[in-house]
């Protein structure tokens, strides 16, 4: 039987690792909700086995081993979580009604606030955020679960190949082969850091201010200038997605009618990227109701991707369902 003192020791020793375990499970599963469930499962397994922990590895490594195994077991019965761009070609008609597909287990965003970065180590913050970029998480979902685990453990957590082989019950050669295949796939489908390099903090703030002003003023000419020519717009749970700045602007004009002052953008951060809670003003009550969450990808001094998630994610970002009229 576990004593109160042992339980207290377990909590005191392990709680510090909860954010990075959540990040590990999120990378594996592509869902904050599922990741939280798996972290709870990890802590339950660890608590039950704590008396037998012999310290042959660090406590952090031991917890990551348990979490990885819990994720691999969960993925045996779960489908991958895609974004719309993984399921077909872009739409060529911005004016055609878009199609919802709620039955698809879509990829979900994660708030930066729960990522557990280390502010005193800027390099670690950059590495941590790069490894949760939306495009990278989407690319990981295409990998078989064990390849996914190999890539995360080797590239993100910097485990040795022998440690990964021991965890997975395979050979070092098999781990290295899986890593090569995983790298090749991710490099083919996910932008590299250089491709999505964000501008300096000052330039980024100015760019996001222009983006906010363009949306809130319904200034589509200004928005067109802010988008890269091959920018991508996705909006799960809708299957339709769009490539090209002109198609994106045409889509907004045709299917998101709003006049100047009808849209409010509230800044936040998701997946290490700028994000906004988006609200549309009711012309009668003047209350602005939630329209979703925009996650923004910046490339140089422009916006290269906008992913709009539905209203269900807003509470996790501390964002309300509506804003009072002004």
Image (cartoon, rainbow, N blue to C red):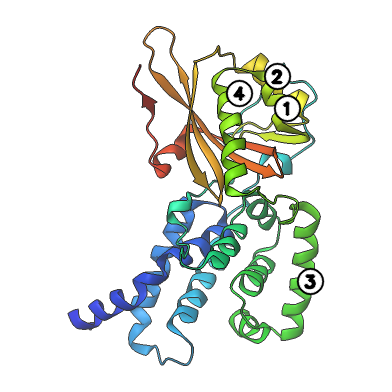
Q: Name the residue under label 2.
A: 221
Q: Is residue 153 above or below residue 57?
A: above
Q: Are marks 3 and 4 in contact (CB under 8 Å)?
A: no
User: Callout 3: helix, strand or loop?
Assistant: helix
Badge 4 density bin: few <14, some 14–19, many ≥20, Cα 10 Å: some
Q: Do the residues labelled 2 and 4 touch (CB within 8 Å)?
A: no
C-alpha gap between disc 4 and disc 1: 10 Å
Observer-nearest of 230 and 15 = 230
Observer-nearest of 164 and 255 = 255
C-alpha gap between disc 3 and disc 4: 43 Å
Q: Name the residue under label 3.
A: 180
Q: Measured from the top left, where is residue 285 in percent x and y?
A: 36, 10
C-alpha gap between disc 1 and disc 3: 39 Å
Observer-nearest of 308 and 82 = 308
User: Callout 2: helix, strand or loop?
Assistant: helix
Q: Measured from the top left, where is residue 140 in percent x and y?
A: 67, 58
Q: Do the residues labelled 1 and 2 touch (CB within 8 Å)?
A: yes
User: Callout 1: helix, strand or loop?
Assistant: helix
Q: Name the residue under label 4.
A: 214
Q: Name the residue under label 1.
A: 225
User: Callout 4: helix, strand or loop?
Assistant: helix
Residue at (46, 40) in percent of width and height: 313
Q: Do the residues labelled 4 and 1 touch (CB within 8 Å)?
A: no
Where's the C terminus, which quadrant? top left
Q: In this view, does 55 lie above or below 311?
A: below
Whether residue 104 can be seen here: no
Badge 3 density bin: few <14, some 14–19, many ≥20, Cα 10 Å: some
Given this view, does label 1 or label 3 mark the residue nearer the observer? Answer: 1
Q: Is residue 319 above or below residue 29?
A: above
Q: Earlier in the sequence, mark 1 or mark 3?
A: 3
């Amino acid at each position: 039987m576990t004593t109160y003192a042992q339980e207290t020791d377990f909590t005191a020793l392990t709680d510090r690792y909860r954010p990075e375990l959540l990040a590990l499970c999120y990378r594996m599963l592509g869902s904050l909700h599922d990741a939280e469930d798996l972290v709870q499962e990890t802590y339950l397994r660890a608590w039950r086995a704590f008396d037998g922990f012999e310290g042959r590895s660090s406590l952090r490594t031991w917890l990551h081993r348990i979490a990885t195994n819990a994720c691999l077991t969960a993925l045996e019965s779960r489908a991958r979580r895609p974004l719309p761009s993984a399921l077909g070609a872009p739409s060529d008609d911005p004016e055609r009604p878009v199609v919802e597909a709620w039955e698809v287990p879509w990829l979900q965003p994660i708030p930066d606030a729960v990522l557990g970065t280390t502010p005193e180590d800027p390099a670690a913050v950059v590495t941590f955020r790069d490894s949760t970029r939306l495009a990278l998480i989407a690319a990981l979902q295409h990998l078989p679960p064990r390849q996914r685990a190999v890539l995360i453990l080797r590239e993100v957590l910097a485990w040795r190949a022998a440690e990964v082989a021991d965890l997975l019950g395979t050979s070092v050669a098999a781990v290295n082969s899986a890593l090569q295949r995983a790298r090749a796939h991710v490099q083919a489908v996910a932008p590299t850091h250089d491709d999505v390099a964000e501008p300096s903090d000052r330039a980024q703030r100015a760019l996001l201010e222009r983006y906010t002003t363009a949306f809130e003023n319904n200034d589509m000419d200004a928005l067109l200038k802010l988008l890269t020519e091959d920018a991508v717009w996705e909006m799960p749970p809708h299957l339709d997605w769009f490539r090209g700045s002109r198609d994106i602007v045409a889509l907004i004009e045709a299917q998101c009618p709003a006049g100047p002052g009808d849209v409010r953008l509230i800044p936040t951060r998701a997946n290490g990227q700028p994000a906004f809670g988006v609200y549309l003003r009711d012309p009668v009550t003047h209350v602005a109701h939630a329209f979703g969450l925009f996650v923004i990808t910046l490339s140089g001094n422009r916006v290269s991707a906008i992913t709009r998630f539905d209203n269900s994610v807003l509470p996790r970002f501390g964002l309300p369902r509506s804003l009072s009229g002004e």
